[in-house]
Image (tube, coloured by chain):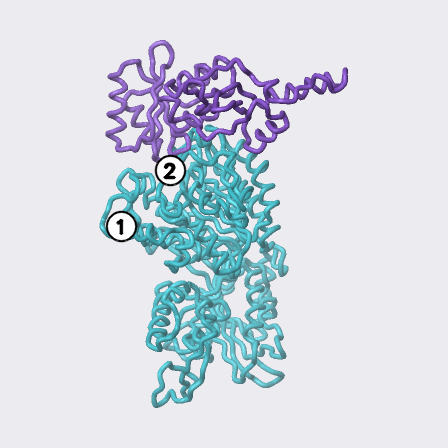
Amino acid sequence: MFVGPRMKRDLVTVTPGATLEEAARLLTAHRIHHLPVVEEGNRLAGIVSDTDLRNATLDGMFRGADSGDSGRPVTVAEIMTRELVTLSPGDTLDDAMLILSGQRIGALPVVEGERLVGIVTKADILSALLSTLDIEGLGVRIEVVLPREMKEVARLAAVLADQDVEVRSLVIAPHGADGYAAFVRVATIDVASVRSRLRTKGFTVGELSDFYEGG
Amino acid sequence: MAFDTTRVGGFGEPLPERDILEGFDRLIAADRLFGADLDSSTIKKSGKGTPFLVRRHPSHHRMLALWRDLFANRVLPQGLLDALAPEVLGLAHGGGLLLFGKDRVLYDCDIVRGNEGVGHLTLSFYREREPVFRFLPFPRRPGRRIVYIEGISLLAQSTGYASSLFRHYERLFHDLGFHRFRLKASLSVGKYYWAKEGFDCEDRLQFREMRENLLALVRRLALPVEEQEVRRLNHASMVATFRRDLTIPVYRNADGYYATVRDASHAEEIRFPLGKAFLLCSDPWDGYKVIYTDTPRRTGLVWSEGYLGHESRPGHPESPKRLEALGSAIREEGMRESLIFLEPYVPAMEFLHAVHDPAYLEAFRGAAARGDRHFAVRDCAISQGSYEAALLAAGGVMAGIDAVLSGRSDNVFCAVRPPGHHAGRSTAMGFCFVNNVAAGARYARSAYGIGRVYILDWDVHHGNGTQALFDEDPLTFFCSLHEHPSFCYPGTGRRLERGRGAGLGATLNVPLAPHAGDREMIEAFEREVVPSIEAFRPELILLSAGFDAHRDDPIAGIECTEDAYVHMTRRVLELADRHCGGRVVSVLEGGYRTESLVSSAIAHIKTLQGREGSPCSSARG
């Protein structure tokens, strides 16, 4: 999955000369946390987040209490982050996830050359996950633990096909040293029959609590 | 509402048999107690009911046995005679006699104004014998106590006398533990009068015939009456008051009998409202009226053979056996005499279109008629009778709402299938086709003007269909207790789902973790559901009562017992008493292990009746 189709293209931005007040108003009005800062020609100059704004305001308040108003930042350019981690539309969502998780940041601007074309936030990643796992769709998840062999995965698929049950999603993840955990989302109220059929066929059908304990 | 049957009226503890025997002797000495032969070939004493011959009284031993069986020794012979003869509207009883037949006691008297006889009354008291096993005529056991109105005749028109007298009798016999009045409505005015007084046909076939005849009359006279209006009628009293806005001519003969067509003898034309006119001309019918249901609350039961017509494939959990088993358990638990049986009807399509897309219903009808094996999804197995059964299920809820809102019963349990709470405007899923509870809620609003309806859904699955239908409706509160959607079908019903738009806040989802038991369920119910009912102040409470959260039910992972259902039922009734006159209509949803479904539903019904104590004799196996 590439970043291009998943990124947000409809962007709210500010210019470096905008005041902090203007920036704060935009964040509130659009209920967002990050504002890319662009210069002429949509050239990305930096990013300002609600955290940056809060820190600047608190900082100014403390300094203001000590020594009057002098030195309090006025424009976005004074507080924005200039050292940016960016993506290009050809990067993948995996890249985005690894960066967001590893660098502990909330949003990644997407650029073509120097030109800003989109943004990917943690919320976008979450919604991609939701749709991959089909969590909003109707159905129930069954967790099956099986040996790490494709033959077993094929056997699982065959048992499900035999039962004529609608499988909404099927996610295979590593489990322990030599196993798979298969997360099967089925669209039937009679999930008990599906579970017991799988057990009859020798599969280990767990509950989510089993995975909690496994760490 | 709740009667304390041990205190009301002063008929409490059984009286000493010595006093009762002494009472017999006093009446015998005063020529007020005799025996009676009930035989149509013998000479009539008088009156128009069962002919009987007065003769010497039977042995004291037999009289006492009968007294014990009928009156539980809670009244003395003279006390009964006194209570039977109140002075009402200036009329009194003269020459009242008690007559002991083989299996019944009769009361026979003249109705007098001063010294002048103006009428006659004969009642008999007996006890039905019902088979212990459904299909075997024997053995039999004592069943309902009956007051049979053999006949009441008044020479002059005495407006309101019979109504007032029977209101007094209703109280009296309620306190004496009698279950029903019965009678044959055969006299001209009686056929209408008794229906208006709340009597219904004893025999459902006879009632259906009555309805068909009314329909035929409507058609013959080309009256502006919809067929569905007639089909909705399910009680003779509804016939009596039917379409008072329309009057039609009827023709009276010299004896005071009426006909709908003029002939040589029926010549005098009189105009009456449609329902009244129809009943005046109708065939005689056997009527009954519930006096007493053995229980503090009068609970109605909707059950119909029609629900068995929806068949699923072998091995399918939602099978007709569920309702067959529940029906036999109700019989075996001896609950028949304590429940008011209500007949479901096929509702007018306009009431169903309030919740379902007409094209969707039409597709469902077509699939069933074509002989498809399932509709929309594989879960929704169907047979040829599925469409009719589904309509009848929604109509069952409407019949329940009719009964509760007209006061015929305090609350109702609708033992219907197929279930409904997963069905959406155009979606069948999870064994559901027509959303019975949602259709009922809409019906209560459009037919009775009920404003705020609270729907509590304690089926183990989230009632996603009902929720979606009332998502934006602030007047219909939807609350669901269910197993958490990450573990359980259909995967909706998270806490964050709280309604939308104007309906924001009128949806409450309370998911329970897998393995939750009675304690967790009751805690969640008390903590969240009870305050939301209090705050909403409903005018009617509907229950989507599935019993599949039971620990023995394999379909999902909640592990509660009958105790949780009893607790929640009792609390819902208390809240209903406070806010909406006790009006609760409970509708069966899921429950797929027969034993736990039956024991839970029986415990639920008994609690609806206001019974305390252990949920069900068979609950613990």
Figure colour of chain B: cyan
Quadrant of the rendered structure where residue B110 is? Answer: bottom right
The reply to the same-chain question for discs 2 and 1 is yes
* Residue appearing at x 39%, y 60% in the figure: B348
Dot 2: within a 10 Å radius of its alpha carbon, few (fewer than 14), some, or many (20 or more) residues? some
Q: Helix, strand or loop at disc 1? A: helix
Query: Which one of the lettered chains is coloured purple?
Result: A
Q: Quadrant of the C terminus of chain B?
A: top left
- Confirm whether residue A175 shows in the render: yes
Circle 1: residue type: Ala
Look at 25% across and 29% down and name the residue there: A161
Quadrant where the image shows the N terminus of chain B: bottom right
Report whether residue B55 is seen. Answer: no
For label 2, the residue is B593
Return the mark for residue B368. 1
Q: Amino acid at mark 2?
A: Arg
